[in-house]
Amino acid sequence: MINIGYYNGVMGPVDEIRIPMRDRAMFFGDGVYDVTFANNHKLFAMEDHLDRFYRSCQLMRIDFHLTRQQLTCEIQKCVDAAETDGPVVIYWQTSRGNGPRNHEFPDASVKPTLLIMITPAKSLNHEEAMKLSECEDTRFFHCNIKTVNLIPNVMAAQKAKEEGCGETVMHRGSQLTECAHSSLLILKDGKLIGPKLNELILPSISRKHIFEIAADLGIPCEARDVTMDEVYDADEVIVCSTTKLCVAADTLNGKPVGMKDRELFHTIQKTYMDRVEREIGWKMY
């Protein structure tokens, strides 16, 4: 039984778990979530993901009731119940709770929910470059919170699919923000560059890891405003996320991009995959 669902302490096959209709995530998207993966029952980079999850809860003023240790234990129970030593994706979210449909927060008697889902991890060919499309970033001004309000992301991801691409790069005017469900970094003249973190950018864990790896390798790093012209002119365009990890892109809107500093990109990519193998035993190449 690999596909595991969990809702407020009830665990079983994901298709058999039922969520109350008055869960505020249903009406308002009033919740936050996070994602990581595991291999051989070992959770990857859990502290980083917990940091972001609890920060999102704080910014949304959701008084999540479990400690970090308690939440990790519940997630570990679900991973163990999947009955596989192979790689799995872990998704978890909390909403503000179940209660009458009112825009205002419910009273203190309504407790936040906990939903967990375990599914098999899809294999990814890290040697195959991604094709990218682009669109204007029309999301709201709380992109730094990993909220479940994802309609603009859904529409951008569908645009990529319909255009035969793996991702859509979003921008506000000429300024790069991120992708539909990934972060975007570039390499230029031996330097790793990414948009500075603010309310328009999700603090991606994979982005954090790649900046750490680059620093450890002695690669200069810079977080600042990045224009779309710079993306088109980059030596390498890097798409990173929990599920993609670190992948290069070779086209953007049908135009060739990147693929000019293969050695440096592969050094970063391999170092990241080595970290995953070292921490949880998942050999990704």
Image (cartoon, rainbow, N blue to C red):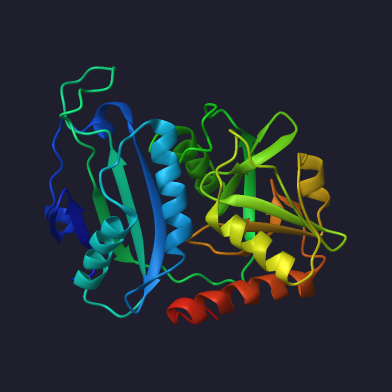
For the residue pair 244 and 254, the one nearer the viewer reads as 244
Please report the residue visible at 47 percent of the width from the left and 38 percent of the height from the top. Answer: 145
Please report the residue visible at 41 percent of the width from the left and 54 percent of the height from the top. Answer: 50
Q: Quadrant of residue 177?
A: top right
Q: Position of residue 67 (x, y in %)?
A: 30, 52
Which quadrant holds the N terminus?
A: bottom left
Residue 231 located left or right of residue 72: right
Q: Position of residue 211 (x, y in %)?
A: 67, 60
Q: Position of residue 7 (x, y in %)?
A: 18, 49
Q: Let me know if residue 7 appears in the view.
A: yes
Residue 165 located left or right of residue 227: left
How many numbered discs?
0
Q: Quadrant of residue 267?
A: bottom right
Please report the residue visible at 25 percent of the width from the left and 44 percent of the height from the top. Answer: 65
Q: Quadrant of residue 12?
A: bottom left
Residue 98 located left or right of residue 151: left
Q: Let me know if residue 127 appears in the view.
A: no
Q: Position of residue 115 (x, y in %)?
A: 24, 49
For the residue pair 63 and 192, the one nearer the viewer reads as 63
Residue 195 located left or right of residue 167: right
Which quadrant holds the C terminus?
A: bottom right
Q: Residue furthest right?
A: 189
Query: Vertically, is 222 above or below 113?
Result: below
Please report the residue visible at 27 percent of the width from the left and 22 percent of the height from the top. Answer: 105
Query: Vertically, is 281 above or below 241?
Result: below
